[in-house]
Image (cartoon, helix red, strand yellow):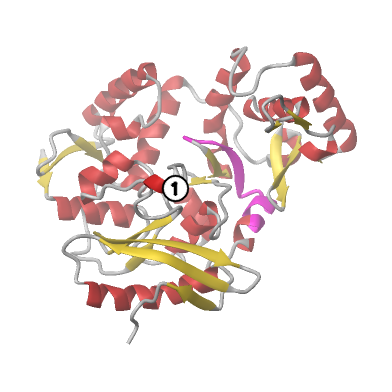
């Protein structure tokens, strides 16, 4: 078994995440990562755009809209709502089948209403939630999801509707045959095919992963099945087992993953809290010694770093957390705070971050940077 040190593991992770090395097109990024998480928070550019920009500084949000329009990417569920590559559409079918068999889920099944909603879309074409009846206010004072919205989401989870596009951030639903190209494989994968896909996709974009990371947020029964398939893949050489110094669990990699790794990395990375590199917080702590928490879900008095603080890396090293907001009407990127990690040479890092923030401001549609000052001279 090959043994690597943490620095090598970190470099493998960054290379596999396409955060260092040649920039890929947005389509190639999604195809390589396997998913890009969608998020509604818009204090800065939304997470799905931020993830792509972090890997290609020429990216603009309209690029993703074009991928959806050209049927190169589509929306469904990964560990969360995500954009996925159309080329891997068939691997969403097992989850859709599970939802079809469930009477209850996040959205209750109302067969009569679902039939009615589906009939309207068949007759009228693509529709949004607001094309149905009005929302209603619940007894607790909060606006509740209308029944038709529940029906739309349930039909979407079961694969009976797809999201053809978004108007603003509003989902537009249509029939699968109107969204999925005829050239796309829609055959149901076998259980073994599906599990092998999950393993290889994880190792493709994470570089290395242990069983807990491969089965992230999955049920215990799936984790046990994944463990068996990992054993089979090890025996036939599809994957390899390695050890990372000072970490007890065995890790797995694809063959030749450790070849031609760079010796170092120094690029400044401003990442989304939902970036594929950082979304598994325990993995982030194990590999990078970085204890990160998004604080928008934390009561304001208990926040340490700000509502939407962003992780900042210099190469493999976490160096800071920055909390900022895009004031789009005034084209100002407002920096509320920046907190540096221990043992960081602030003077050197601050200049590098200041330079990167200029392109980050432009990405957010801002011309100026206000608030907490960064030394750039």
- Give the vertical position of 304 relative to 127 (above or below): below
Residue at the spot of label 1: 300
Is the residue marked by circle 1 packed among few (<14), some (14-19), or many (20+) residues within 10 Å?
few
Please tell me whether residue 66 belongs to the stretch shown in magenta.
yes
Name the quadrant containing residue 326: bottom right
- Give the vertical position of 21 relative to 376 (above or below): above
Q: Is residue 340 left or right of residue 28?
A: left
Residue under the point 36% across and 32% down? 216
Q: Is residue 257 left or right of residue 27?
A: left
- Give the vertical position of 202 relative to 72 (above or below): above
Name the spot of residue 70 as percent of width and height, x first: 67, 53
Most foreground residue, 13 or 32 = 13
Q: Total of numbered circles in the picture?
A: 1
Residue under the point 50% across and 51% down? 30
Most foreground residue, 253 or 105 = 105
Most foreground residue, 292 or 161 = 292
Q: Which residues are magenta?
A: 65-79
Name the spot of residue 147 as percent of width and height, x first: 76, 25
Let me know if residue 160 appears in the view.
no
- Give the vertical position of 374 relative to 323 (above or below): below
Name the spot of residue 347 as percent of width and height, x first: 24, 77
Name the quadrant containing residue 377: bottom left
Numbered disc 1: secondary structure: helix
Residue farthest to the bottom, as pictured: 377
The quarter of the rendered structure image containing the N terminus is top left
Residue under the point 45% across and 54% down? 308
Residue under the point 17% across and 33% down? 249
């Amino acid at each position: 078994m090959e043994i690597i040190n943490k620095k090598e593991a970190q470099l493998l992770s960054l290379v596999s995440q396409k955060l260092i090395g040649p920039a890929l097109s947005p389509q190639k990024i999604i195809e390589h990562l396997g998913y890009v998480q969608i998020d509604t928070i818009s204090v800065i550019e939304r997470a799905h755009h931020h993830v792509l920009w972090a890997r290609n500084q020429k990216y603009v949000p309209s690029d993703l809209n074009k991928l959806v329009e050209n049927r190169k990417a589509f929306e469904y569920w990964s560990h969360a709502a995500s954009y996925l590559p159309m080329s891997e559409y068939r691997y969403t079918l097992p989850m859709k089948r599970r939802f079809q068999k469930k009477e209850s889920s996040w959205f209750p099944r109302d067969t009569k209403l679902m039939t009615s909603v589906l009939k309207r879309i068949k007759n009228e074409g693509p529709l949004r939630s607001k094309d149905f009846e009005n929302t209603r206010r619940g007894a607790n004072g909060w606006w509740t999801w209308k029944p038709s919205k529940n029906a739309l989401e349930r039909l979407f989870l079961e694969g009976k509707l797809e999201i053809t596009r978004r108007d603003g951030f509003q989902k537009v639903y249509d029939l699968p045959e109107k969204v999925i190209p005829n050239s796309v494989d829609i055959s149901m994968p076998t259980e073994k095919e599906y599990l092998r896909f999950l393993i290889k996709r994880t190792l493709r974009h994470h570089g290395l992963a242990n069983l807990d990371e491969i089965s992230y947020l999955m049920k215990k029964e799936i984790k046990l099945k994944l463990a068996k398939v990992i054993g089979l893949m090890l025996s036939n050489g599809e994957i390899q087992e390695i050890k990372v110094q000072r970490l007890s669990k065995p890790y797995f990699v694809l063959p030749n993953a450790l070849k031609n790794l760079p010796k170092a990395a120094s690029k400044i990375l401003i990442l989304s809290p939902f970036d594929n590199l950082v979304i598994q917080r325990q993995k982030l702590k194990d590999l990078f010694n970085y204890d990160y928490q998004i604080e928008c879900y934390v009561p304001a008095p208990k926040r340490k770093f700000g509502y939407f603080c962003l992780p900042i890396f210099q190469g493999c090293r976490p160096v800071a957390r920055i909390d900022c907001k895009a004031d789009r009407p005034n084209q100002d990127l407002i920096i509320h705070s920046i907190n540096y990690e221990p043992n960081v040479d602030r003077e050197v890092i601050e200049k590098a971050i200041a330079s990167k923030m200029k392109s980050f401001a432009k990405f957010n549609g801002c011309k100026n940077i206000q608030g907490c000052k960064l030394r750039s001279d």
